[in-house]
């Protein structure tokens, strides 16, 4: 009995985390569930669409979504928030600077998807740089990474970075949409995200995962910006 309890206590905390992605919607967005297998509580990042599939994944994992956190307010990341919130009672958090973008997501859906979608609910609270958001057994550090949108945030926990639409494998988030700013995005990536350890696993808002070290060495946008800085 004692031995069992001791073994449990000594098990590294990382083993308690369950992390699963599900690709949802027309824009093939990665929604992430980060749960704790001991406490059964989970955070959902960017429920962009197909809320029933996201809820089914949480059920399969044996966790309850207690908190919804958005990397930014674009419609492909936010259209599932209302249904997940209604089904779970989870609180919804995002950065204040993306509020207008989030509020217009219903209208954008009509334009992009050709169907009416109820706009996302107002956030229960706002997140800011260096905040920590948590449920029992899962804690995310907020890194404000503006550029793709003014309120874009990335989230770090236990050697993993959820980079939203800021950093992708071999690419970066587009900056030609309203509120986008290329220089700001490169500063967010280089001065904030690349400061993380090279072995950090990057789980982005679209496409496959990567690592910070791989992007530092091979991402053409990053290499170009680093060269530009050297020449200054
Ligand atoms: Zn986006
Ligand atoms: Zn996106």
Image: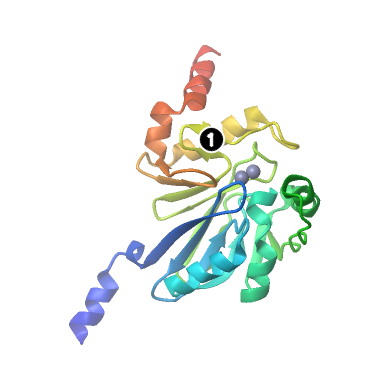
In the rendered view of the protein, which quadrant contains the C terminus?
top right
Name the residue nearer the viewer: 226 or 102: 102
In the rendered view of the protein, which quadrant contains the N terminus?
bottom left
Q: Is residue 219 left or right of residue 173?
A: left
Do we see residue 73 in this rendering? no
Q: How is the image coloured?
A: rainbow
Is residue 197 shown above or below 51?
above
Is residue 166 shown above or below 107?
above
Disc 1 is placed on an element classified as helix
The residue lying furthest to the front in this view is 114
Residue beneath disc 1: 189
Q: Report the residue at 30% width, 64% height from top.
A: 12
The residue lying furthest to the left in this view is 3
Q: Report the residue at 45% width, 69% height from top.
A: 137
Name the residue nearer the viewer: 148 or 139: 148
Q: Is residue 29 left or right of residue 62?
A: right
Residue 40: % across, % down? 45, 75
Residue 31 occupies which quadrant of the picture? Answer: bottom right
Q: Report the residue at 48% width, 24% height from top.
A: 220
Residue 115: % across, % down? 76, 54
Name the residue nearer the viewer: 29 or 132: 29
Residue 159: % across, % down? 39, 51
The residue carrying pointer 1 sits among few (fewer than 14), some (14 to 19) or many (20 or more) residues within 10 Å by Cα, namely many
The residue lying furthest to the top in this view is 231
Do we see residue 22 in this rendering? yes
Ligand 1 closer than 8 Å to label 1 CB: no
Q: Is residue 139 left or right of residue 115?
A: left
Residue 221: % across, % down? 52, 25
- Judged from the image, the quadrant occupied by ligand 2 is top right
Q: Is residue 112 left or right of residue 8?
A: right
């Amino acid at each position: 009995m004692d031995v069992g309890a001791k073994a449990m206590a000594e098990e590294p905390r990382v083993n308690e985390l369950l992390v699963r992605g599900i690709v949802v919607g027309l824009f093939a967005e990665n929604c992430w569930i980060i749960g704790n297998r001991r406490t059964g509580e989970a955070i959902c990042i960017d429920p962009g669409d197909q809320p029933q599939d996201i809820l089914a994944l949480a059920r399969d994992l044996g966790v309850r979504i207690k908190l919804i956190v958005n990397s930014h307010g674009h419609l492909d990341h936010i259209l599932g928030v209302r249904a997940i919130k209604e089904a779970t009672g989870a609180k919804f958090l995002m950065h204040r600077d993306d509020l207008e973008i989030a509020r217009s997501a219903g209208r954008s859906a009509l334009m992009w998807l050709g169907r009416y979608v109820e706009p996302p609910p107002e956030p229960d609270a706002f997140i800011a740089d260096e905040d920590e958001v948590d449920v029992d057994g899962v804690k995310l550090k907020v890194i404000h990474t503006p550029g793709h949108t003014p309120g874009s945030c990335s989230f770090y926990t236990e050697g993993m970075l959820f980079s939203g639409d800021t950093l992708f494998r071999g690419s970066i988030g587009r900056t030609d949409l309203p509120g986008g700013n290329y220089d700001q995005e490169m500063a967010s990536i280089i001065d904030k995200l690349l400061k993380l350890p090279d072995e950090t696993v990057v789980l982005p808002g679209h496409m496959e995962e990567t690592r910070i070290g791989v992007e530092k060495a091979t991402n053409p946008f990053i290499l170009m910006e680093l060269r530009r800085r050297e020449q200054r």
